[in-house]
Amino acid sequence: MNIELIANLSYVVSAILFIFGLKMLGSPATARRGNLLSSLGMLIAVVAGLTAEGIVSYEYIIGGMLIGGLIGAAAARLVEMTSMPEMVALFNGSGGAASLLVGWATLYGGDISTFTAVTVLLAILIGGMTFTGSLIAYGKLSETINSAAVVFTGQQVVNSLILIGILVSGYMFAVDPHPESQWLYIMLGLAMVFGIMAVIPIGGADMPVVISLLNSYSGLAACAAGFAINNNILIVAGSLVGAAGIILTNIMCKAMNRSLTNVLFSGFGAVKQGKAIEGEVKPISVEDAYYLFEAASNVCFVPGYGMAVAQAQHVVKELGEILENNGAEVSYAIHPVAGRMPGHMNVLLAEADVPYEQLVEMDEINPRIENVDICVVIGANDVVNPSAREDEDSPIYGMPIINVDKARTVFVLKRSMASGFSGVDNPLFFGENTRMLFGDAKESISGVISEFG
């Protein structure tokens, strides 16, 4: 059978696996299988592409699979759940860099048409932006650089000049496309600088949106690279990733009641704002918390990034089972932007084998939260901050939140009174029905479990 025909059939199989895999990622119950199907589809596509074009022999393909498999296995085992957002940012950056290199390599294949030159430009431009933007996102998420928004006078003018430079250099390259063109290097440099400038004015609280947007960029870069090398499956895969990323970005923006333009250009988090918070903090001991848990008939856990830091998901699940056996109804309220990447809390709870049916979305829990005896906030801050609902001067005003303050009692598990990743103070901590359980969340919950005996 013709090797090209086999490759095209393999591409069709890969595309089908991508589509079904992406669909399965829409539910926690099927996400793992969806990820496996998509990975299998990509493996088939890569092997078919390399063999059909006669690029490398099977020995190199097998060697690459073994090396990549070892790196992937090591990352899966060694990277902590708290570092997952940073790893996703690096994945996005790697995808952008790969598309950039594929597009660039196309220039060495001889004379190219104007259309191909344009697709190469797009692959290099979007890939370069994605690469450097993802590195900045990684730095903010890992807090190796300041997670707050970085804004300065004349920032929009600088960005406009960079964009004009990209357009001019891109046009000059397209007129005479060749790999040694100085205009190509100028455009590449400006694209990478633009990626940095696009992400630094975005504050830490908006990082989940940035992660999904950069994911979309990496898909678009791959799509452009697919057009550059005339590879159908790369076009399909890039389009799927790009579209999925845009849809997810839109969902995240709606969850914060903000437009994408506002997220990208508002400089959110640059300065703390809002009304001064007055009130008295009311700490509670593990023993006193136990008595309230023991009498509760409806308990709702609200996880945040602090749960990932404390690695408390397993003891939270254990406490949930104890409360169920004690006759309580247990649920887990998930805000769309809780954590530092889309689906962060879902992944944490799935790791602890929390039943999917106990995970409740924000819009579902809010109408009945007044009937909840105890809301347990574990390391969450912005997604339960009442100032988003009440304080028009707050930077997060208008963002939909989980209304935990309307529950009968609120337990907030924190190490200290420090504000969250966005730097916005939270009046919930001073509420009349709020009790602060200070300390490591895992140790605190373990202490409650031991009280149940």
Image: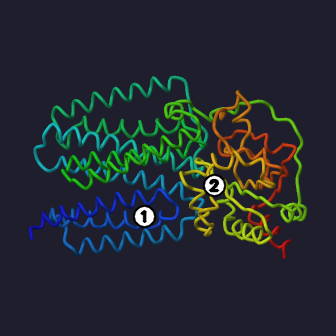
Figure check: 187 above or below 64 = above
Q: Does residue 415 show up?
A: no
| Secondary structure of residue under mark 2 | strand
Q: Residue 360's mark?
A: 2
User: Which element type, helix, strand or loop, lies under badge 1?
Assistant: helix
Q: Is residue 327 left or right of residue 63?
A: right
Locate residue 196 relative to residue 236 in the image: left or right: right
Task: Please tell me which residue is depicted at 21% across the width and 74% down the height of the picture.
Answer: 58
Dot 2 or dot 1: first in sequence order is 1
The x and y percentages for residue 11 are 23, 61
Q: Nearer the viewer, residue 254 or 7?
A: 254
Quadrant holding the N terminus: bottom left
Does 244 appear above or below 82?
above
Give the spatial CA distance, label 2 vs label 1. 23 Å
- Can I make out residue 23 in this image? yes
Q: Quadrant of residue 312?
A: bottom right
Which residue is drawn at the image coordinates 21% and 30% (left, top)? 172
